[in-house]
Image (cartoon, rainbow, N blue to C red):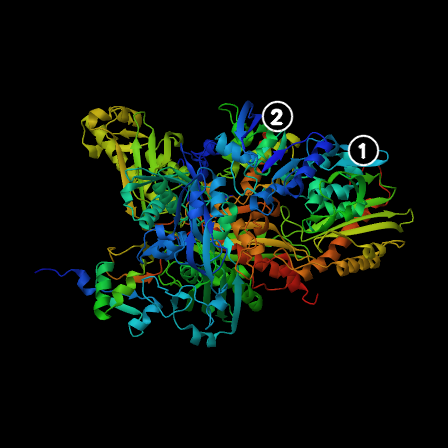
Amino acid sequence: MSKRHVTTTIDGESREFLCEDEQTLLDVLRDVLMKTGTKEGCGTGDCGACSVMLDSRLVCSCLMLAAEAEGRVIETVEGMAEGDRLHPLQQHFLEEAALQCGVCTPGFLVAAQALLARNPDPSEREVRFWLAGNLCRCTGYDKIIRAVLAAAAEMRGADA
Amino acid sequence: MEYAAPRSLDEAIGLLSQVGVDARPMAGGTDLLVQLRTGTRRPKLLVDLKQIPGLCGIDCGSQGFRIGAAVSGAEIGECLPLREAWPGVVEATELIGSTQIQGRASLGGNLCNASPAADSVPALIAAGAVCTVIGPGGRREVPVEEVVRGPGETTLSEAEIVVDFRLPQPQEGTGDAYQRMIPRTEMDIAIVGAGVSLRLAESGECLACRVALGAVAARPIRVDAAAEALIDRRPDAAALGELAAQASAAADPIDDKRGTRAYRSRVAGVLARRAAEMALRRAGPRRVAGSPAS
Amino acid sequence: MTQKTRDDQTLKWVGTRPIRPDGVEKVTGRARYGADFARPDMLWAKVLRSPHAHARIRSIDVREALALDGVKAIVTGDDLPEIASEQAFVGEEPTDYRMMSQNVLARGKVGYVGHAIAAVAATTSAVAEEALGLIEVDYEILPHVLDAVSAIAPDAPLVHDDLCDRKGEKKAPSNIANEVEMGHGDPEAAFASADFVIDRSFTTQAVHQGYIEPHACLAEAGPDGQVTIWCSSQGQFMIRGYTAKLLGLDLAQVRVVPAEIGGGFGGKTTVYLEPLAVALSQRSGRPVKMVMSREEVFRATGPASASRIRVKIGATRAGNFVAGEAWLDYEAGAFPGSSVAAGSMTIFAPYAFEHARSHGRDILVNKPKSAAYRAPGAPMAAFAVESVVDDLARQLEIDPIDLRLQNAAQEGVQSSFGPRYKRIGFVETLEAAQAHPHYDAPLKANQGRGVAAGMWFNAGLQSSAAVMVNADGSISVISGNPDIGGSRASLAMMAAEEFGIAYEKVGVRIGDTASVGYNDVTGGSRVTLATGKMVVEASRQVIAQLCERAAKVWDVDVERVQWADGKATVPDDDTIKPLGLAEIATGAGRTGGPIQASASGSVRGVGMSFAVHLCDVEVDPETGKVDVIRYTAFQDAGRAIHPSYVEGQIQGGAVQGIGWALNEAYVFDESGRLENPGFLDYRMPVASDLPMIDAVIIEVANPDHPYGVRGVGEAPIVPPIPAVANAVRAATGVRFSDLPLSPPRVLDALDPAS
Amino acid sequence: MTRLPERLFSLARVFLPRSLAPYTGGVLEVELPGETIRALIAGLEAAYPGLAEKLSGQLAVAIDGDIVADPYLEVVGATSEVHFLPPVGGG
């Protein structure tokens, strides 16, 4: 069977790719488009390392076929910074030492960005439950939660 | 495996009929793609239902609610009128997986995946939800509790699709709730789930009650004996105790990696009681429109 | 929160919290991990794994698989060289190269469900997967044994019929692969003089390290025999050494390029895929990429051992520990080498015993070969001993921290594993916990507080580092240890401190095996400590050279030159203008050429780190669910170079321990098949399960390190299990002796009648 | 007159792993002359033939409380306490 042609927008660029029908969006991002910033931790939607935004909705790219991306807008961690300027979440992850090995970080950043877009002033509890689908084995989450709360505060300040 | 994204119900049913057992309808795909990866299902054709207008969107009317079977949990959670009317259903739906899963997972998929532990199903059964099923043989209305036959198996015929779910506008004095037991706070499959919907009279007497349990039998079950412990009574501690005992007695679970038979039976009663208590708080004293659900 | 015990006004960087050098790459998705590499014309390889726990392989027929379009090479056990028995040192878990080779690819017999049997390289991963289904393996199924108790029964099936011990000696056939015994005095006699003796047994289940990044590698074997491997691991030199050994290659033929590592916790201190990828690349002539699925990670890579531990402690009425004795049985898995020796060493280590003895046994079962996991062997031992200490405190009606203080190990005390302690900070750590507001905070109904202690060694081992002065005065440091949790930052800070320059002027790179001297693995809490020591040493050599160059420029005696604040000066002559690093570097060509130094050594002077944790839980009496509601972890870090990453180690270790205590466990069915090989049912803690983890750093300097560092990575996983269990005991009145403290187990214990 | 090195009169106290008791007739503590671990092992071998090979599997020693991996040539102080230990690595 010949491959499927998909037209989509990824991190602000229109992208076309060829894929097999059974390939997930994650497979295509990493192995076809070589956008390896999005990580695979489990392939079954249990770790959140592959989190991306699909038409402004947070999803696991491992639980979505690449074919479903036709005509959709996808945002990954690779599009978060504006040129050299890090997103406040990225900056606070660094300042709070919210990453150790860093492999879960792309997923956490995308998920946290989705949270702050929806709720600019989340409580600690809201952050914890929103991010429950992102596993981190290094940090015990403490510094991640602090980084998200600090970024939220900064972003609220910037908006004011 | 091939993927198809039909734009109409007719087209979808046509594809499903044509390919037969090797075709599989897909809504959010959050269970199905895992099954593909682990090899537990190997369909030749995946029929994506999310492009079909009839399976999308939520309609809120004076007669009640129509929830498209492919609507994501996140959209359901954002529908304030639905949350106001049926907080238990919405909360149960929101318990399906992570925020990421919520971006995709649907009521149709949660039901038709036919897991005994599906979170939304006991809540929907308790709320009296009915689904619209359309297939080559036409259209029929099926109460949610009649859809699941056993683990991974439904009563739907070949090429039949669950199109939407219908819930009435709740009558005055109605409250519903869903409680589940998982070892963590998130990301687990329910060891036990309990949905309760009930209606109180002005006097405080319970006029109607439906209780449903998940993960304690081969499929989600409605437990009328537990409901009857409250109906036509004041829902006092004794009545709630009876409800719990009946729920435990009705449970017929298995031992597995997630929990033991004894544990599930016992906790089924605890959760049914807790769900009933929450439903009671929501039902009365009469809620003021717009007040936040507890 | 940091409690400084030393006041060092002169330090500019040590103790501060700069942003890690590799940070931007890691928050933008640009950092490359094990699975992020690709080469033109690359093949994908997959592994066929045993469906049986124990079986003889009669034959493997790969003909049909090889004939499949797109399949380029297949290897089975027959294709790897036969390896002589020779001891290998794998993290905490001593093993043998012959066994390691058999674990990488089965020969003749499979020992567990998931054991690798063959590997296929094909043009796509889908074709490789399809080819696995075409390989025919003829098995003779053998009876299997799944737990330590059955394994040592007289009629137990033998996991190895040709068991060799570590020195390659033939032993009488049994599943006991090794025995250790240590201690001093005569506990048996001493128990008679105790007023109270508690004797209790505990069990724990196998748990996985749970790193988020699955094992992955890319290997390319050239026609000239040169091999390059890109992979993530806890040591590029370890990967090179083991791969070369298992394939019969010269070390110089193999270059391993370290990827960023997505977590290891001890689990990436051995090889699984790399020898297979190289063998497939040699056969196909093309680069070969391999990535494990999460299911494969659970089924086939090392968990920490399941254990059975009996602990007996005798104390006087006044609360003095008289004697302690412990019996530890750890499941090694299908090959020898559990962490039982370390468990036996650490079990009584926090306390001063006149009479102490521990007996450890390494027991073979038909499960995956166990691997090192953060403070290997110690957490389960601590669960046992700290539970008993907690019970003693209750029985004696002594505050549990007072009881520990009364018996705490300190400088000069003979440890239960042999040597006398040098300066350690256990007493200070206990005192900090006792003084903390958490210790006296009120509790509500169904809540309880637990306290527990633990210790872990630091490993010194072998380290190398190179330090180079660049023409613009910036400094490049090359380390040979993968940065698993911020060690680039701590190495850069120590170098900046030595040179007296800005932290940002120091670049740290992790070198491949051809660009820096040999380093043992990133493990044993050793990188900041041991490799840091080499960075300091190399920096000091470079500074000596800088002073010499300045002396040449000035034409003064080098003895008169001093280095301070990034400049060479002549303190006794203020007419000589100081020369900055950049000035000396720019003119280096004139004064003798490039300025650089490297340092290598077997690092001595390692410290030990002690930790004390306070845990509050709330138990739901109707469901048995335990929630951790407050947690404070105290640890002696010697000196926290970068306190944020020290806190991070403490917090992460605490949470891994909490997961181990509450829900994590391998669940096997009767056939030996793991029933929960995924994150869904393995149940590691998620963000909403936890409170903030308050980390309190105590600094009792390690006198043998230039900055007083003690390795901190591992000790924090030692106390959490007993801290949780003691808190549950306080909340419920029930002493739990078996892990995990899952809701069904807890509810059953609270009300067994139901 | 040549002064004898002080070392000739001093002995290291060597503690053996309990598992080696069968090879030493139950002796677990030995006082021996020797400036390095190698010399101590040679002394042990002389007293208990076969013991050197047993000790080669012990990869670590503690010399006065300082744990050293692969210590064969490590220098032993005049009155050092030397413990043979199982190897300690870590995760």
- Badge 2 crowding class, 10 Å Cα cut-off, few under 14, some 14 to 19, many 20 or more, is few
Residue at the (83%, 36%) spot, across then down: B64
The one of C133 and A97 positioned closer to us in this rendering: C133
The one of C333 and D39 positioned closer to us in this rendering: C333
Q: Is residue C694 left or right of residue B259?
A: left
- Badge 1 crowding class, 10 Å Cα cut-off, few under 14, some 14 to 19, many 20 or more, is some
Residue C376: x and y in percent read 44, 55
Residue C522: x and y in percent read 39, 46
Tell me the residue that label 1 is attached to. Answer: B60
Name the amino acid type tagged 2: Gly
Badge 1 sits on which subunit? B
Residue B193: x and y in percent read 71, 51
The one of C155 and C88 positioned closer to us in this rendering: C155
Work out whether C352 lies above or below B60: below
**Image quarter of the C terminus of chain C:** bottom right
Tell me the residue that label 2 is attached to. Answer: A71
Q: Quadrant of residue C424?
A: bottom left
Work out whether C697 lies above or below C381: above
Name the amino acid type tagged 1: Cys
Q: Quadrant of residue A159?
A: top right
